[in-house]
Image (cartoon, rainbow, N blue to C red):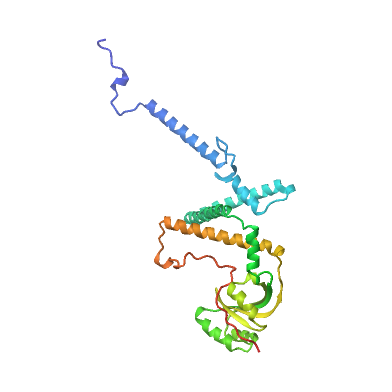
Amino acid sequence: MPGRLPHPRASRSPGVHPRRTTSRASRRLALASRCLGLLLLVGAAGCSPVGDPEVVARVNGNPILASDLDRALRHAPPTADAVGSARRLALESLVIEELFAQQYLRAVPGSAAVDRAVVTAARRDALAQRFVAGLMKDVPRPTANEIRAAFHASPSLYARRQVFELRQVDIQAPPERGDEIRRQIASQPDVEALLEWLRAENLRFAMNLAEVGTEDLPPPLAKRLPSLRPGQVAVLPAPNGLLLLQLVGSRAAPLDLVTAWPSIEARLWAERQKAAVSEEFARLSKLAMIRYEPEAAPTPSGPRTSARGAWPAVPVMSKEAP
């Protein structure tokens, strides 16, 4: 209609928003912020819109799983009348550990990277152990005939078994002094004189007596010891120096088939398991791309294994005491 003024909205230029619209957007933004804050608060308090039956607790939002609790209980299995209290104590211990772990990550600069490295190493170890455990399940136990054959094939371990009383002297010394100590052992009239020389040279050593059965010795030493007389010594390399063994005495301690049966079965089964792991390692190594740094390359004979608790299989040197 002529003379009618245009509608106020039609006169606004593009890009200019009305004040009422700006106020509505601000209210929506504030509402969204409050909702986000509530969600974060709920998460920190350990609440969740959808419950997870695997989660038994949350510490600042980090979950503690039922599987974690089960593993903690397996290390110290409770009695039947204390299952409930043991479970509560184990869960409380996990909560304390999680609190302390979080505090460490907050307090120590750069600890997050250390934490990732520890988690990576623990994951690798746990998964490898599970894989090896799966291999072990497929390794058959030795049969009764195999156990009987092993018993008759090693009379020195069973029917003619001996127990040796040994005086052990663990000498701590740098590798460059090994030959000198060996010469001193060969020239000393007895072990007591050797100990005095070690004290004079400020070489640390530890001495003890041990009784060792033939089955606990490496084959070279098990063959050598029966031919020694009391007072004779053997020298073996040790991780931190040398190990001197003096034969104090020996006695016959035969084992019959019934008594030796469990140990023979365990030994044969362990040998099969070790062979299965070695074969699987060899198979996977051919399929994998493995690259060693030059300074960390393994020996050509294959991967090194831990020798903790193992007797070194080396030639025996001995002398006769006066």
Could you tell me which residue is drawn at 62 percent across and 63 percent down? 267
The residue closer to the viewer here, 70 or 319, is: 319
The residue closer to the viewer here, 43 or 192, is: 192
Numbered circles on residues, count: 0
Residue 288 placed where, x, y %? 42, 56
Vertical arrangement, residue 17 with respect to residue 173, above or below: above
Q: Is residue 276 visible?
A: yes
Residue 252 placed where, x, y %? 71, 74
Quadrant showing the C terminus: bottom right
The residue closer to the viewer here, 126 or 20, is: 126
Vertical arrangement, residue 216 with respect to residue 1, above or below: below
Q: Hey, which quadrant is residue 44 in on the image?
A: top right
Q: Hey, which quadrant is residue 28 in on the image?
A: top left
Residue 136 placed where, x, y %? 57, 55
Furthest residue toward right: 81
Furthest residue toward top: 1
Vertical arrangement, residue 128 with respect to residue 30, above or below: below
Report whether 258 appears left or right of 22.
right
Residue 195 placed where, x, y %? 62, 84
Could you tell me which residue is drawn at 55 percent across and 38 percent down? 42
Report whether 7 appears left or right of 96.
left
Quadrant showing the N terminus: top left
Could you tell me which residue is drawn at 37 percent across and 27 percent down? 19
Q: Is residue 168 visible?
A: no
